[in-house]
Amino acid sequence: MKRKQFLEKKGYLLTSVTDIVEASEISKGTFYNYFTSKEELAITIFKQEYSVLYQRLDQIMQEEDKTQKEKFKTCIELLVKFHIKNAEILNISFSQATLDDDFNQFLLSVRSKSVKWIKEQMLLVYGKDTKPYLNDLAMMLTGMILLFVFVSSKRNKERARIPEAVDYVMNRMEVIVKDVVRTKEIVLTDEDMDGFTPDHLSLKKRRMGKLKNLVEDLLMKIDAGQIADSDKWQLKETLNALLAELNNKETPRSFIIQGAILYLKQQVPKNLENEISKLESQINELL
């Protein structure tokens, strides 16, 4: 919790590992037992934030006592509040800052999921006639939301105007949707969107490649280690089974993955504990 609060207060770009360990009152050694870098810590924190956000959005859209438009409006208001609170994520996304590759990939995946979610909800709210124009409609809605977020994040007193701003945006979208469907104009194609959001399969393939390299390195270290042959066999079989589950399943079974990781954590020699932590981190990124 202290680490999260410190990142929020000082900002991701200005925060160093030294700042984090001092604020958390832990040693650097303890920090590096859990995270390889401040980037990995930030990704972990932001992933938790986004996980809670999308769970809440899904809950709202499943409510039965409101219309689709009312639920969508509530979701947009929640998105605005979330991004005002976490404005630095947007600032980093649109800045020219040099970032860790994993953090860049995380930002791209967030952007991709956000656009995909908005397009899916707009189709439900405004109807199937909007399907050919969803790229344009999603970008226009996102643009209006982001501009309000950028302005509001600089002036706390503007937060009280969030409902008013969301009403304004949703009223404009009603007119825009009707006009776009009437004129049948399309600006952004699916190919254009490929440059804005990463291809999910390509991203997964890259991450799977990194994971395979890590597993192969672990297998070699297990072979070379002073470990009983029976234990070596068990550890290697667990790693191979874990890799197979991730590689061959469209939706990997969580209980198998978690069970394998738990076994590895409990059974590997102490000198390989950090490697297993890295493996767990890579798997979390993949999923």
Image (tube, rainbow, N blue to C red):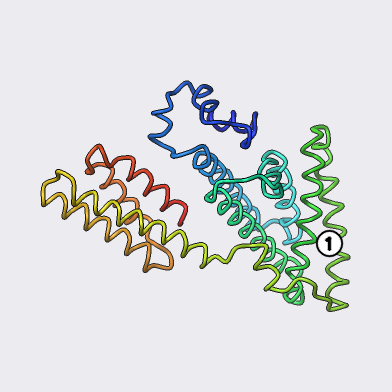
Residue at 61% across, 48% down: 53
Above or below, 17 relative to 191: above
Residue at 69% across, 56% down: 65
User: Is disc 1 surrounded by few (<14), some (14 to 19) or many (20+) residues within 10 Å?
Assistant: some
Q: Position of residue 249 (x, y in %)?
A: 39, 67
Report the number of discs.
Answer: 1
Instruction: Pick whichever, 95 or 241, lies toward us.
Output: 95
Above or below, 263 relative to 12: below
Q: As drawn, is 241 to the left or to the right of 19?
A: left
Instruction: Pick whichever, 123 or 188, lies toward us.
Output: 188
Q: Residue furthest left?
A: 229
Which amino acid is tagged 1? Met
Q: As drawn, is 276 to the left or to the right of 192?
A: left
- Quarter where residue 273 is shown: top left
Q: Position of residue 136 (x, y in %)?
A: 77, 68
> Mark 1 sits on what residue?
173
- Quarter where residue 124 is shown: bottom right
Q: Secondary structure at mark 1?
A: helix
Residue at 59% across, 46% down: 99
Q: Position of residue 258 (x, y in %)?
A: 34, 51
- Quarter where residue 143 is shown: bottom right
Residue at 43% across, 64% down: 251
Q: Position of residue 175 (x, y in %)?
A: 88, 65
Q: As drawn, is 161 to the left or to the right of 30?
A: right
Above or below, 98 relative to 105: above
Q: As drawn, is 102 to the left or to the right of 197?
A: left
